[in-house]
Image: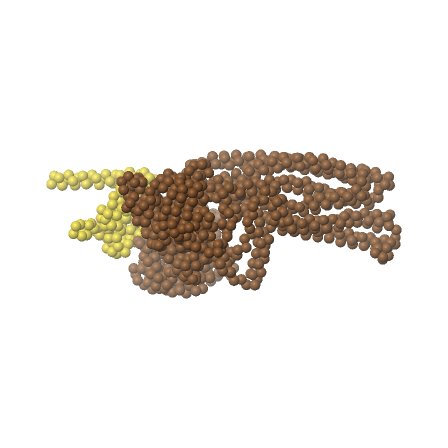
Chain colours: A yellow, B brown
């Protein structure tokens, strides 16, 4: 897997879609690539979070703890971005992610991410815009739910 | 070896070298007749043999008749003989005085150092270490030279002067008197001027001492200088001090040259008198021409001893002052008696019984009371916690208990022994003390552990005959200089104190104490990362190869094979850099240093031969352009450069211009130096880590070919510079871990390093290699002040050192405060367990930790506030509960 493929993967993440390719390349180059064996966990619910993961290859399950044990709530795969909340604010992980197959990820550490944002404010603007979109759509969903 | 301070340098000289000084003086006196003859002979040659004025030929010499020519030959031969005799005298006297001086210098330095060992602790707060260093190293250096000359020089040079003068006076008293007429003036004036120089010299010594102090301070306070942006101020300060030194030195030069001017001018009066008065006498026929010539020759030699004497006068005064200055610094009040420090008691009894302090008080040098009539009594087999806030005096109490200081008033008694009267041989062996930051000596972990059980040489070292002779010579020299006669090569380890019988048991005991302080795993890891020394390789190399084989077998498991990429001479290792792939071995020394491969001539010749140079240059170009693309927007000095870039921010513009030139004029336009810059880039690339896609399969294949060419054509003189990876031989330049791994950790495998560590650890245990690896770890050099270990590791090692000597009472002065809470609790339990049945007195940094101790001693403002058990004391209104609440 070369740097360019990683840049492509980063571009497919909405949060990074509009950011200049050269910045994404720097982000990719400075980030570690980490492979998880099938069955191993990227992180566990309740852990303090310090990194987000972009899945470059493989499949994983999103699990949450319920009184009746673990419950798989979603599946994630190539080009999905997981754990991103943790690099924006200090909250414990809200779910566990477990690799179903061998999983290749790009690790975006909080530290690195903030340094990039500090260095390139245009990145911050793009991210803000994306977050606003999300807020807008969540609010929309909420409104619909209330009306419905 | 004990000595009272000699108040003056002459007393010191006479006390330790009276015999040598007498011998030197006698030798000097014995040389004078020959000297006189040496001046007399030329006169006989000129007047008698050549001019035949005083002798009529043929004449008889010792009953044999000789003619004029033979007479001349005989006299000339005698002259030559006298030259040799006189020079031989000089040689022997100088050598002997050199030896005397050097021995005395050695003695003086040894005395001073041994005094440092006996300084009372507060003295170290007032005197900086660099000051002591300059005094012992450079300031006493001239004293050695002076001591050798102390008596011999005035006798020899003075005698020399008198011999020449008397010769001159015998020839013609009037002429001689005129020649030395100004000597008294010189003898009066010059010392006066020299005294002036000496005042400046003293000032210079003082300034230079302060200067070295400042340099020492800068090194110690470097963090403060950086974090306070005070470099400019420091530079200004230093510059000012240098200015002061300059001024003083300039004054010294001015006065020195004035002295020289006067000296030389006055000395030239001699020849003036000889030419004028002597010439007049010869013309009048009152003086033979040979006599005048001999007188001129003799007078020429007069200047040297005269100058030496004047110089000596100055050196003598200098040496007196310097000696007094230095000695003053080295006899502080309250020094420990030498006998208390070095004498070996006949029998050392355990320090057990009641530990009772009565009316203990301690006042510091500024008169502030630290302890005021503290009185307490505990049993020596109890575990006592000492708690109290800042200024409570708990740490001072421990200093007194460890006999590090003497109380100003009151006393401590253990059993029926008065602590202050006990020699260090007892307190240093039966008690153990660990302060808040234990000091490690610049040595191996093993030596630091054993430091507490090496008190005196116990078992003689075995020497070959040659070594024995060298050793004996060393010993006799040491005796002649009053130095230590203990053999450092002997076995100093007190096995009995450790409680073991032999080296194997000792090793196990070392591991055990390391386990008790929680350092075992650290030492194992250090050992794993160490290079095995050739001596231990012999027995162990095969074992480690076995471990390598077993590890290889585990690699068949696909889950594990993903974690490590083994070395294979036929395959390109994706997790190694191109440089590592090319060398396929561990560099020994600096020739094939991975950072400078592009500059290496042989590497370049191999690349050329395989046609790789151009390819790699292109790869370098690609990497450079990627780096510029990635990093050009970052400000210079951004941490990313250091962390991620192959090109530093300073080099970036340079690479930019190289690339521009290449795109304009082609690769040919690149200078040799720039080629090296470009070429160095691909060497650092590892495909799997850097994902730049620059080193493609084709390049990899060609690097593999180059790898083989590199090994096959390696010239003989480079054979030692690299140790190739070979599946079936132990790589003696690589670490133990690298040898077992025989490959590279795969990049980016989650938890890979830990998993591999576990597998290696398992194999190591299966093969019984854990102990040998830990033994290798024990040989790790901890660096100056233990700097290569972490603060926590240093502290734990300090505790292990204390445990090893099995003290009757373990005194801990906030010895675990640098550790985190959980490790402190674990260590507390483990140390208390080890010291079961023996005593602990532990000044705790948090009162809450005192729960569970047999006795708790609460101190407040230098007094004992409470003493009792946790349950007794933990009540409303007690000093303990007050402390607990404030935490």
Residue reaching furthest to the front: B416
Residue A52 shown left or right of residue B545 in the figure:
left
At a point 46% along the width and 41% down the height, the residue shown is B122
* Residue B116 x/y as whole percent: 51, 46
Q: In this orientation, which residue lies closer to the viewer: B11 or B753?
A: B11
The number of discs equals: 0
Residue B166 shown left or right of residue B248 in the figure:
right
Q: In this orientation, which residue lies closer to the viewer: B130 or B708?
A: B130
At a point 67% along the width and 47% down the height, the residue shown is B152
Residue B175 shown left or right of residue B795 in the figure:
right
Residue A132 shown left or right of residue B589 in the figure:
left
* Residue B30 x/y as whole percent: 72, 50
* Residue B5 x/y as whole percent: 56, 44
At a point 53% along the width and 41% down the height, the residue shown is B329
At a point 46% along the width and 43% down the height, the residue shown is B121
Residue reaching furthest to the left: A148
In the image, residue B325 above or below residue B702 = above
* Residue B609 x/y as whole percent: 47, 58
Q: Would you say residue B347 is visible in this rendering?
A: yes
Q: Would you say residue B791 is visible in this rendering?
A: no
Quadrant of the rendered image containing residue B742: bottom left
Quadrant of the rendered image containing residue B388: top left
In the image, residue B9 above or below residue B65 = above
Quadrant position of the C terminus of chain B in the picture? top left
């Amino acid at each position: 897997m070369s740097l360019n493929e990683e840049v492509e993967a980063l571009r497919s993440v909405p949060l990074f879609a509009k950011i200049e390719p050269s910045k994404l390349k720097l982000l990719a180059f400075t980030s570690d690539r980490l492979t998880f064996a099938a069955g191993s966990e990227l992180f566990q619910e309740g852990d303090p979070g310090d990194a987000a993961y972009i899945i470059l290859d493989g499949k994983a399950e999103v699990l949450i703890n319920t009184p009746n044990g673990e419950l798989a709530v979603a599946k994630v795969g190539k080009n999905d971005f997981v754990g991103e909340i943790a690099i924006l604010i200090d909250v414990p992980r809200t779910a566990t992610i477990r690799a179903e197959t061998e999983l290749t990820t790009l690790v975006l550490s909080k530290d690195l991410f903030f340094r990039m944002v500090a260095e390139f404010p245009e990145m911050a603007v793009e991210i803000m815009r994306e977050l606003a979109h999300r807020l807008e759509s969540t609010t929309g969903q909420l409104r619909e739910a209330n009306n419905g | 070896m004990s000595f009272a301070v000699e108040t003056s340098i002459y007393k010191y000289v006479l006390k330790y070298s009276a015999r040598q000084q007498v011998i030197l003086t006698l030798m000097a006196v014995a040389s004078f007749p020959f000297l006189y003859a040496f001046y007399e002979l030329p006169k006989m040659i000129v007047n008698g043999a050549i001019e035949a004025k005083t002798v009529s030929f043929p004449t008889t010499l010792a009953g044999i008749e000789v003619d004029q020519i033979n007479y001349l030959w005989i006299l000339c031969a005698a002259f030559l003989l006298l030259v040799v005799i006189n020079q031989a005298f000089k040689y022997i006297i100088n050598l002997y005085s050199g030896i005397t001086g050097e021995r005395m210098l050695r003695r003086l330095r040894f005395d001073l150092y041994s005094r440092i060992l006996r300084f009372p602790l507060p003295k170290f707060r007032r005197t900086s270490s660099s000051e002591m260093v300059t005094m012992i190293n450079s300031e006493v250096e001239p004293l050695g030279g002076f001591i050798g000359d102390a008596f011999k020089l005035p006798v020899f040079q003075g005698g020399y002067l008198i011999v020449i003068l008397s010769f001159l006076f015998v020839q013609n008293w009037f002429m001689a008197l005129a020649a030395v007429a100004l000597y008294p003036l010189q003898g009066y004036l010059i010392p006066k001027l020299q005294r002036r120089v000496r005042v400046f010299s003293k000032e210079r010594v003082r300034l230079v001492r302060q200067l070295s102090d400042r340099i020492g301070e800068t090194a110690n306070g470097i963090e403060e200088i950086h974090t306070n942006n005070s470099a400019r101020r420091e530079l200004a300060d230093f510059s000012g001090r240098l200015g002061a030194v300059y001024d003083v030195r300039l004054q010294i030069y001015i006065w020195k040259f004035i002295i020289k001017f006067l000296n030389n001018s006055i000395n030239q009066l001699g020849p003036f008198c000889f030419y004028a008065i002597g010439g007049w006498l010869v013309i009048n026929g009152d003086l033979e021409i040979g006599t005048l010539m001999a007188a001129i020759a003799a007078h020429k030699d007069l200047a040297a001893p005269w100058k030496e004497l004047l110089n000596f006068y100055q050196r003598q005064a200098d040496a007196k002052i310097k000696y007094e200055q230095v000695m003053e610094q080295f006899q502080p009040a309250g020094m420990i008696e030498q006998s208390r420090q070095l004498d070996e008691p006949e029998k050392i009894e355990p320090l057990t019984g009641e530990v009772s302090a009565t009316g203990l008080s301690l006042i510091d040098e500024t008169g502030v009371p630290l302890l005021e009539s503290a009185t307490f009594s505990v049993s020596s087999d109890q575990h006592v916690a000492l708690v109290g806030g800042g200024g409570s005096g708990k740490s001072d109490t421990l200093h007194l208990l460890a006999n590090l200081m003497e109380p100003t008033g009151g006393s401590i008694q253990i059993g029926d022994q008065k602590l202050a009267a006990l020699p260090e041989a007892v307190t240093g062996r039966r008690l153990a003390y660990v302060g808040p930051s234990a000091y490690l000596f610049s040595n191996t972990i093993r030596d630091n552990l054993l430091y507490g059980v090496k008190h005196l040489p116990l078992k003689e070292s075995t020497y070959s005959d040659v070594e024995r002779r060298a050793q004996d010579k060393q010993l006799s020299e040491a005796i002649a200089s009053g130095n230590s006669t203990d053999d450092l090569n002997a076995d100093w380890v007190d096995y009995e104190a450790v409680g073991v019988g032999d080296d194997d048991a000792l090793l196990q005991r070392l591991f055990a104490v390391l386990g008790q302080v929680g350092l075992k795993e650290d030492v194992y890891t250090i050992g794993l990362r160490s290079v095995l020394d050739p001596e231990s390789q012999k027995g162990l190399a095969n074992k480690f190869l076995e471990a390598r084989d077993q590890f290889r077998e585990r690699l068949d498991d696909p889950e594990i094979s993903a974690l490590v990429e083994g070395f294979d001479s036929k395959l390109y290792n994706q997790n190694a850099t191109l440089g590592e792939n090319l060398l396929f071995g561990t560099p020994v020394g600096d020739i094939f240093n991975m950072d400078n491969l592009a500059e290496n001539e042989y590497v370049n010749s191999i690349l050329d031969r395989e046609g790789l140079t151009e390819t790699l240059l292109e790869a370098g170009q690609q990497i450079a352009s990627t780096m510029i693309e990635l990093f050009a927007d970052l400000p210079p000095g951004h941490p990313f450069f250091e962390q991620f870039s192959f090109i530093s921010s300073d080099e970036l513009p340079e690479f930019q211009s190289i690339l521009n030139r290449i795109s304009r004029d082609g690769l040919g336009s690149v200078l040799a130096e720039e080629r090296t810059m470009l070429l160095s880039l691909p060497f650092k690339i590892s495909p799997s880590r850097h994902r730049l896609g620059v080193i493609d399969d084709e390049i990899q294949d060609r690097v593999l070919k180059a790898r083989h060419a590199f090994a096959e054509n390696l010239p003989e003189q480079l054979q030692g510079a690299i140790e190739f990876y070979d599946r079936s031989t132990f790589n003696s330049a690589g670490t133990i871990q690298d040898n077992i791994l025989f490959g590279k950790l795969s990049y980016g495998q989650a938890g890979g390093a830990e998993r591999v560590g576990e597998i290696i650890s398992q194999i190591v245990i299966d093969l019984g290699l854990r102990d040998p690896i830990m033994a290798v770890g024990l040989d790790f050099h901890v660096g100056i002040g233990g700097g290569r270990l972490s603060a926590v590791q240093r502290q734990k090692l300090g505790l292990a050192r204390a445990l090893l000597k099995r003290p009757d009472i373990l005194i801990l002065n906030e010895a675990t405060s640098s550790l985190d809470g959980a490790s402190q609790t674990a260590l507390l339990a483990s140390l208390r367990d080890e010291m079961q049945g023996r005593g602990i007195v532990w000044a705790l940094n948090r009162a809450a930790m005192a729960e569970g101790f047999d006795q708790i001693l609460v101190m407040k403002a230098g007094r004992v506030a409470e003493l009792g058990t946790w349950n007794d004391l933990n009540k409303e209104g007690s000093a303990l509960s007050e402390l607990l609440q404030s935490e």
